[in-house]
């Protein structure tokens, strides 16, 4: 019919794809609008749950740091300052009964903490070091007056001592001689101790000095006047409020040390000290590593004795001790939190904390996530544990509190971003500051890095503008028949999309770097950067190089814009892919913790909903995959274009016959192009990179050029249109389906369901029933609730 | 309880419990003294009985009965008083008494209003419910409670003495130094807050400690057979407070 009004087959195909493009963009627009409306509504009308905790927080002290310290100090005050024994509520006049009785002796003996040590060794972990008693020690340390034994543990004995010249009380830690037998110990000791001495943080026990006196290796450390968490736990259960007041300070210490590249490896209650001013201080940082001899010459039992405390060790510390990183500390922290809350260890199929004590179920989620077996599934940063607990912590006020949708879905980020007070006695201020997903800590990121990211962003946006301009120019020229749908048009479009994709990749890469740098001193040491990020960055650089090569080629004058087109296109695809993956890494992988936590594996209601959602979710993914088929086919046109040569001519390539193995390749009409693509399915799995050499190796004047203007032009147009009209919605469907299966991203899933129904992708016939099904399931109130809690 | 404790000067000229017990058959005064002593240390007995698994009501009756029997029947005169400690004696006696009562049968109504001591058992039950719930033996609870009662009595006496002299605020501030300087604010600061010189403060602290030691030892002396046993009892009580 259209042919009647004077349109040829080519134009009809163009119109068809433009329609697809239009619908695709329309679908995105509608879905996006719906999502933002929903978000805006959530922002402006906080539900009753959002209002209730606000009221709670008003009645609470505003200064959280102060409040946390007060709570911790109230724990320490339950212990005798003299002998550190627990004071019961029945202590006479609030004084320590044992010390009072000691006061009745005729000649009061100096009080010693027999059996009431600061760092009580776990029973049977280490044979006691009996060879060194303070009397013996004294001659090694003329500068110290050794006052009393504070405790012994796997990490050696600790004495309270007075540094004579400075007249200050210090803790002297003597490394067990057994550990120091290893010939390489001295060197390792010096290296580690120097690293430890650099740790300067209010929540970390400072190392003043270290060295070797005779046969003895020692560390002189800050003396913490208080008790350790083990003693506090023994003296009686901590209230959830007390337990959760201790955690943020531990997180601060861990985050600081992790940023310095130091892993504790032995976080346990014995190493968490609470001083009388209410500060929490972590002791023995990195000493576990110090005391582990080289990985080849120690037995397993030795390892366990000196390296950590099995009950608090992360699974990978047993299984792959050499690969242990900071996330092992996060696991151990989880065990400590669990123990503080419940008084038990999370062993086997352990009950959720909220089943044992009155706390918000969201705290369960945080604890469970720190206890994930796989390091990649845990929180990746200690500061995340802190901010997540801060946003969930207020919930302990009432366990059964309903959670208003938007608030929980947006998680801590929204709470902090909107500057509202999280429902807790902790102030939002520290959480906001240290929340890595929001902004780099003040002074934490070097200026150069920030400038680099900013330049990357600006250049990317500029590049995208240039690309859009080039595309617009080519289309305008083509429409006004100034530019035939042939070589030059193809070249301009390629250049345009190359710049567009390059710009996109640049922006995505910069965003990725920015997010990863936040909280870390530099990108190279960012705890969240994995090898995958570096591969993607390399891939992006490759794409940019290709685009630059195309530009060079163009400016060089050889063959005009039409000869540079393929280079631009290869660059475009590469940059586009790299950009997409980088965005995925940034938003999905790194940004994960700020979304609602993983499903509690034990929640039957959640499991039921998950099963119900799985059907439509998988359906959406299938529709997305079907929608990707034309994209793959379009991508396959690139080799065709490359091999057939740019411009309005192709050359007869004997290479063609060998490579493609089909006669169809000689006839570059759209149909033939598709056929050729189908004949080489292996290309579907590869990136455009392998074809780059073909482009570069393009013979200057190929023999036997044949005129096929339409074929090449259509191949190009098909490719471009397919990429836009089908790829984005299809990828979106797959991502949304994937996340929907995990009960995440309700908004995204709703958008995807709408897109599935609209004729945006090749799979839309399949998408109509599945999209409707997904919409129906997603709109159920109980599903919405589970998604958001 | 401590407020009602007789804490007069009489306690300073120590009378060992064995002497009181021996005299209890003869004079009302020494009988009253013995009753006072029992009244002072009733709570450890009560806690012991509760920890033995007696219900609150049952433990109350049993304790009443025990003290009544103790005081009326001259039970004490039989005791091996010469070497004994009042603490050990009471513990043995109450254990034996409880066993005997059990034989007689729980159905038998005991006591019957024979309230020979005025004891606030409701207060005792409240205190017992606040006892730490760890798996201490009844004996351990008894000994711990004994030590704490002893200290309560000593400090109450000290407090009363200061109150009588109008020096209660001083006592409130200085009492924290009884267990040592650790954890207490610097002496200079304390002296300023009291309007004293640092030297005067040191003397005051020293005096308080001396006075406290005397009172504590006198209190203990009441419950042992001889003056020489005081240190031994002190050590035993410290062990009871600290031990495993």
Image (spheres, rainbow, N blue to C red):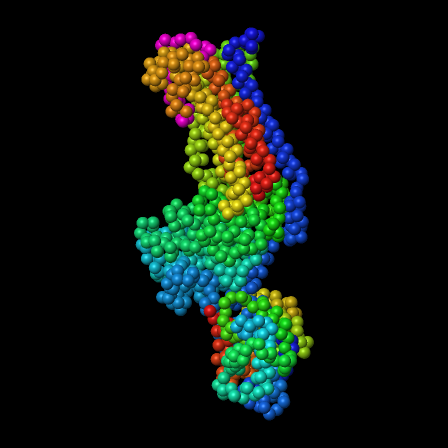
Judge by depth and name the residue closer to the eye, A283 or A196. A283
Percent coordinates x, y for residue A386 in the rendering: 54, 48
Percent coordinates x, y for residue B204 in the rendering: 60, 75
Residue at left 42%, top 13%?
A668
Percent coordinates x, y for residue A319 in the rendering: 38, 48
- Identify the image quadrant of the C terminus of chain A: top right
Q: Is residue A654 visible?
A: yes
Residue at left 50%, top 12%?
A10
Percent coordinates x, y for residue B32 in the rendering: 62, 86
Q: Is residue A696 visible?
A: no
- Identify the image quadrant of the N terminus of chain A: top right
Judge by depth and name the residue closer to the eye, B70 or A383. B70
Question: Looking at the rendering, which quadrant does residue B54 occupy?
Answer: bottom right
Residue at left 58%, top 48%?
A392
Q: Which segment did they paint magenta?
A: A685-712
Residue A7 lies in magenta, yes or no? no
Q: Residue furthest bottom?
A: B26
Left or right, B89 with reference to A218: right
Judge by depth and name the residue closer to the eye, A421 or A211. A421
Judge by depth and name the residue closer to the eye, A708 or A556. A708
Vertical placement of A127 versus B117: above or below? above
Total number of numbered discs in the rendering: 0
Question: Looking at the rendering, which quadrant does residue B33 occupy?
Answer: bottom right
Vertical placement of A680 versus B58: above or below? above
Residue A691 lies in magenta, yes or no? yes
């Amino acid at each position: 019919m259209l042919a009647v009004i004077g349109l040829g087959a080519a134009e009809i195909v163009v119109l068809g794809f433009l329609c697809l493009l239009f619908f695709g963009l329309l679908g995105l627009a509608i879905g996006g609008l719906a999502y933002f409306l929903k978000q805006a509504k959530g922002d402006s009308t906080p539900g009753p749950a959002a209002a209730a905790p606000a009221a709670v927080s008003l009645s609470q002290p505003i200064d959280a740091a102060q409040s946390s310290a007060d709570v911790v100090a109230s724990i320490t005050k339950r212990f005798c300052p003299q002998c550190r024994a627990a004071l019961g509520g029945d202590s006479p006049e609030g004084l320590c009964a044992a010390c009072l009785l000691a006061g009745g002796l005729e000649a009061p003996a100096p009080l010693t903490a027999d059996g009431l040590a600061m760092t009580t060794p776990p029973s049977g972990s280490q044979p006691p070091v009996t060879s060194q008693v303070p009397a013996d020690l004294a001659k090694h340390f003329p500068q110290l007056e050794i006052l009393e034994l504070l405790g012994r543990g796997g990490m050696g004995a600790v004495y309270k001592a007075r540094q004579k010249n400075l007249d200050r009380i210090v803790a002297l830690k003597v490394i067990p001689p057994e550990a120091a037998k290893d010939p390489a110990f001295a060197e390792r000791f010096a290296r580690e101790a120097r690293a430890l001495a650099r740790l300067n943080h209010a929540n970390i026990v400072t190392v003043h000095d270290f060295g070797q006196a005779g046969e003895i290796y020692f560390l002189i450390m800050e003396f913490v006047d208080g008790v350790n968490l083990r003693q506090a736990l023994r003296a009686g259960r901590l209230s959830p409020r007390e337990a959760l007041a201790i955690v943020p300070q531990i997180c601060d210490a861990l985050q600081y040390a992790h940023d310095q590249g130091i892993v504790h490896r032995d976080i346990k209650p014995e190493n968490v000290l609470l001083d009388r001013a209410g500060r929490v201080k972590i002791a023995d940082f990195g000493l576990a590593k110090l005391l582990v001899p080289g990985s080849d010459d120690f037995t397993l039992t030795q390892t366990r004795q000196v390296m950590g405390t099995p009950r608090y060790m992360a699974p990978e510390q047993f299984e792959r001790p050499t690969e242990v990183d900071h996330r092992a500390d996060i696991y151990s922290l989880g065990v400590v939190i669990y123990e503080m809350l419940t008084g038990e260890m999370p062993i086997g199929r352990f009950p959720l904390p909220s089943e044992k004590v009155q706390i918000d179920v969201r705290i369960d989620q945080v604890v469970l996530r720190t206890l994930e077996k796989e390091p990649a599934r845990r929180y990746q940063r200690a500061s995340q544990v802190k901010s997540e607990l801060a946003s969930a912590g207020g919930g302990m006020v009432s366990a059964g509190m309903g959670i208003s949708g938007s608030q929980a879905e947006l998680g801590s980020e929204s709470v902090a971003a909107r500057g509202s007070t999280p429902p807790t006695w902790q102030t939002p201020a520290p959480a906001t500051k240290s929340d890595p997903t929001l902004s780099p800590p003040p002074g934490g990121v070097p200026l150069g890095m920030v400038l680099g990211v900013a330049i990357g962003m600006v250049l990317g946006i500029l590049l995208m503008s240039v690309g859009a301009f080039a595309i617009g120019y080519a289309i305008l020229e083509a429409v006004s028949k100034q530019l035939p749908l042939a070589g030059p048009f193809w070249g301009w479009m390629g250049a345009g999309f190359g710049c567009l994709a390059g710009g996109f990749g640049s922006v995505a890469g910069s965003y990725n770097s920015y997010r990863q740098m936040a909280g870390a001193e530099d990108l190279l040491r960012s705890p969240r950067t994995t090898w995958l990020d570096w591969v993607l960055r390399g891939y992006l650089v490759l794409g940019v190089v290709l685009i630059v090569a195309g530009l060079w080629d163009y400016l060089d004058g050889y063959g005009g814009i039409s000869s540079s087109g393929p280079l631009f296109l290869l660059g475009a695809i590469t940059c586009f892919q790299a950009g997409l993956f980088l965005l995925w890494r940034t938003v999905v992988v790194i940004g994960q913790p700020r979304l609602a936590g993983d499903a509690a594996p034990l929640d039957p209601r959640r499991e039921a909903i998950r099963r119900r959602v799985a059907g439509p979710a998988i359906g959406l993914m299938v529709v997305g995959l079907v929608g990707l088929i034309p994209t793959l086919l379009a991508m396959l046109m690139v080799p065709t274009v490359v091999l057939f040569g740019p411009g309005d001519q192709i050359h007869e390539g004997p290479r063609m016959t060998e490579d493609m193995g089909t006669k169809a390749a000689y006839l570059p009409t759209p149909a033939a192009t598709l056929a050729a693509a189908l004949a080489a399915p292996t290309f579907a799995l590869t990136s455009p990179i392998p074809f780059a050499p073909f482009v570069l190796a393009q013979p200057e004047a190929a023999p036997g050029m044949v005129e096929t203007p339409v074929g090449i032009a259509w191949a190009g147009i098909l490719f471009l249109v397919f990429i836009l009209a089908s790829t984005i919605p299809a990828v979106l469907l797959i991502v949304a389906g994937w996340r929907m299966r995990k009960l995440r991203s309700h908004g995204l899933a709703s958008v995807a369901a709408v897109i599935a129904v609209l004729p945006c992708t090749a799979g839309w016939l399949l998408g109509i029933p599945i999209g409707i099904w997904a919409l129906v399931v997603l709109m159920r109130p109980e599903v919405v609730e589970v998604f958001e809690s | 309880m401590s407020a009602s404790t007789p804490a007069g000067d009489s306690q300073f000229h120590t009378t060992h419990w064995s002497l009181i017990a021996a005299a209890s058959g003869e004079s009302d005064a020494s009988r009253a003294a013995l009753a006072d002593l029992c009244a002072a240390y009733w709570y450890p007995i009560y806690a012991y009985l509760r920890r033995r698994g007696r219900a609150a009501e049952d433990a109350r009756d049993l304790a009443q009965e025990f003290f009544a029997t103790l005081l009326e029947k001259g039970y004490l005169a039989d005791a091996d008083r010469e070497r004994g400690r009042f603490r050990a004696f009471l513990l043995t006696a109450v254990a034996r008494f409880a066993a005997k009562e059990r034989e007689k049968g729980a159905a038998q109504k005991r006591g019957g209003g024979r309230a020979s001591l005025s004891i606030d058992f409701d207060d005792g039950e409240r205190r017992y419910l606040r006892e730490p719930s760890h798996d201490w033996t009844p004996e351990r609870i008894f000994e711990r409670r004994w030590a704490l009662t002893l200290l309560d009595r000593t400090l109450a006496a000290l407090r009363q003495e200061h109150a009588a002299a109008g020096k209660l605020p001083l006592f409130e501030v200085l009492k924290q130094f009884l267990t040592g300087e650790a954890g207490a604010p610097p002496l200079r600061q304390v002296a300023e807050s009291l309007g004293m010189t640092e030297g005067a403060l040191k003397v005051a602290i020293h005096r308080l400690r001396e006075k406290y030691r005397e009172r504590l030892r006198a209190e203990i002396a009441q419950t042992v057979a001889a003056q020489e046993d005081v240190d031994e009892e002190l050590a035993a009580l410290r062990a009871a407070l600290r031990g495993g």
